[in-house]
Amino acid sequence: MRNSAFARVTGFVLTTFMMGQLSCAAGDWPNWRGPQLNGNAVAGDYPLEWGADKNIRWKTELPGKSGSTPIVWDDLMVMTMPIDEQNGVLCLDRSGTEKWRVTLGAARPGKHKKGSGANPSPVTDGNTLIVYYKSGDFAGLDWTGKVLWHENLQKMYGEDTLWWDLGTSPVLTSKYVVVACVQSGPSYLAAFDKQTGKEVWKVDRNLGAPEEAAQTYSTPVVTTFQGKEQIVMLGADHVTCHDAETGKEIWRVGGLNPDEDKYFRSIASPVMSGEIVIAPYARGKSLTAIKMGGHGDVTHSQVLWTKPMGSDVPTPATRDGKVYVCGDKGNISCLDAATGEEIWSMQLPKNRNAYSSSPILAGNLLYIVREDAEAFVLDAETGDVKSQNSLGKDEFCISTPVLLNNEIFLRTFDRLFCIESATNKVSAR
């Protein structure tokens, strides 16, 4: 299964999460990429094996289909989905019991089989729960389900011109909630007050990419560089870095689409490895590493390496100077973030289903889920497969798994599973 010929950061560290976010407890998962924004789980003893009737603590039917990832704060878990043709928010407790549900305007249906009107994942600072939908509806709620504010960004700034279904999730800085809109037509990055939803700043991001290449479904990443909070955005053939306080562009890297391919829309998001930005692009055909720093066009000064590989949909995970890349066809690679050197690579089993869920690291384990909810657990040091786990023939999954307090929460289009095992688990510390 291993293929090293095709050449192409463990534990929860609180200071790392001061990337404009918040101090969250060890049992929280406040956004789709985990508490460190890089695909790392909190330390714990996580299940190694499970099945449709094995090591399932509970499962619950969901009232709507969506690919967004659940978030968890204390004992509550929140997901977005269409509910009775409305933009819905569903809250469960950690036992799977529904606590409340809220709807926020008419849902706009998805166009693609992987799409819906509720693909963006929610985000929270522990006080305000923030949700965003394909219809443009954008809202803040408290943890009882009370709507604190409700805006519609398309009514404010113009209609969505994306060819497919909105997938960009909101992100938090230390002060604001930020939304990126990169599309054919006016594109922007905007920040809003978390308590009121009122605009704080908005900057244009129009970079002249051709046709569909001007569109992105990726999510910005918030980081801190030399003591200053910054936002990194991938899309429209560029990576740009912005001041989190004002939105002003600090630097940009171009050259991601040298032949001006019209169809290089981007789905996978950038991820940080220390002070290095890892940017998947070109429908999985390029992976670029950029050293933070500089001003203006830094294409020729800050790019560390580019490799003819990557992922179209899954966002890489990073830890300890390594980058874990999951290609859409299950080709997995571990690279050195500073040099791009391949540490190991392997090929997971293929079938008609692709890999859309983003990989999650838990200690020495790497969790990867295929669209049919077939989950593979790999040794993160070697790439060896430790287990292969199925939830049955009727599941469809593009959500990222959530690993917390020795449990795995795996959302499919129809159900939410809580996976827990007293045996067959490996310590992830």
Image (cartoon, helix red, strand yellow):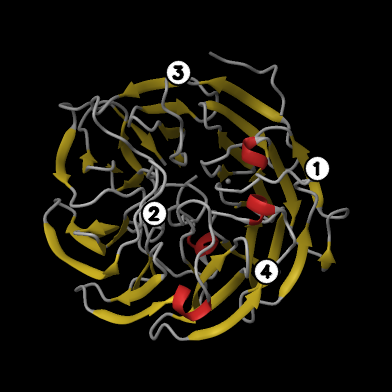
Give the side of residue 102 with respect to residue 116, left or right: left
> Where's the C terminus, which quadrant?
top left
Q: Under tag 4, what secondary structure?
A: loop
Provide the residue designation for mark 3. Answer: 349
Res 114 quadrant in image: top left
Q: Amino acid at mark 1?
A: Asp
- Given contact means CB atoms under 8 Å apart, are the residues at marks 2 and 1 in contact? no
Circle on res. 259: 1
Q: Amino acid at mark 2?
A: Asn
Distance of label 4 from label 3 (alpha carbons): 40 Å
Going by the numbered disc 3, the residue's amino acid type is Pro
- Residue at 70% from the left image edge and 57% from the top image edge: 239
- Asked whether the beta carbons under mark 2 and mark 3 sit within 8 Å of each other, the answer is no
In the rendered structure, which disc, 2 or 1, sits on the residue that comes first in sequence?
2
Give the foreground label among 4 and 3: 4
Query: In whole angstroms, how far apart are the C-alphas of marks 3 and 1?
Result: 33 Å
Query: CB under 8 Å between callouts 4 and 3?
Result: no
Q: Position of residue 299 (x, y in %)?
A: 83, 55
Residue ID at (70%, 46%): 262
Q: Nearer the viewer, residue 408 or 216?
A: 216
Q: Secondary structure at mark 2?
A: loop
Within-10-Å neighbours for mark 4: few <14, some 14–19, many 20+? some
Position of residue 15 relative to residue 218, above or below, is below
Q: Which residue is mark 2?
A: 119
| Mark 2 crowd level (few <14, some 14–19, many ≥20, 10 Å Cα) | many
